[in-house]
Amino acid sequence: MFWKRKKKEPDTKKRFGSLAFYFSIPTTTVLALLVGGQTIYYFKHHPLDISRIVIFSHSFLAGILVASTLFSERIKTLVHELKHAAVVILTGNKIKEISVGSGEGHVHYEAYKETSHLEPFVAMAPYFFPLFSLPILIASFFIDPFYPTAALYCLGIFYGIDLTTGYLEITSYQSDLKRIYGGFIATRSFLISTNLLYLLLVLFWAFTGRPGLFVSLQLLSKAAQAAGGQFQ
């Protein structure tokens, strides 16, 4: 009543590890190989759209330039903590506090028992989660038929920002990467597989658009029918 209650500081020493996290490494690797194979298949049967490649490449480089030269330390810290916060929400946990300063910050959250196995993804969020470009990639499915150039340009810029901010985080000293059981091998394997998968997904959409997606769905349908026929 007569004194201010001391604020509980977030636990920055807790370490994480779960079967879901470790199993995601081979899973994303296999998915990346499938998307890469799908891309090769598509371009064996369809010509390259040079205009889409030029637009995406130009906007991607613009995104890299923006993130690497115009983002202040406070903005970089904000992006770092927002990625933590986004994955906290996506994994079904509860945010209690977000603090952002110049070069330092934290997200204090409550992890529920049933979602505790997803905490490694929260810890790794700043290094793989595409905070800016993922919403654009999803929206592009609906925008592309009407404004293909705008959708593609936005995707390139925001993917460039996501990739650059994630790379700059990895190359700097970050305690998050030291909180995963398995250390360097586990964290780097996860980051390589997840970032490669997302890169291939972005490039596949950027270079093929909706036609490429429809071809993929047709192939998946044929594969499912073939697999079903083997069990009949």
Image: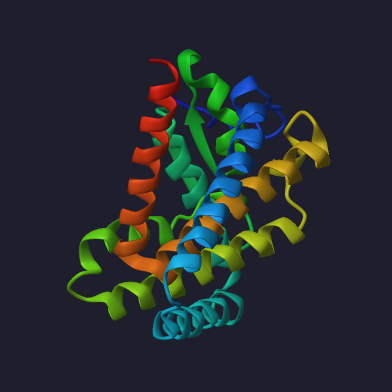
User: Foreground: 99 or 191?
Assistant: 191
User: Foreground: 210 or 45?
Assistant: 45
Residue 183: percent from left, percent from top:
81, 36
Residue ID at (41%, 63%): 205
Q: Quadrant of the C terminus?
A: top left
Q: Horizontally, is 92 left or right of 57 in the view? A: left
Residue ID at (61%, 59%): 166
Q: Is residue 152 visible?
A: yes
Residue 231: percent from left, percent from top:
43, 16
For residue 97, above or below residue 35: above
Q: Quadrant of the N terminus?
A: top left
For residue 37, above or below residue 90: below
The chosen color scheme is rainbow
Q: Horizontally, is 124 left or right of 145 in the view? A: right
Q: Is residue 1 visible?
A: no
Q: Quadrant of residue 170?
A: bottom right
Residue 35: percent from left, percent from top:
52, 51
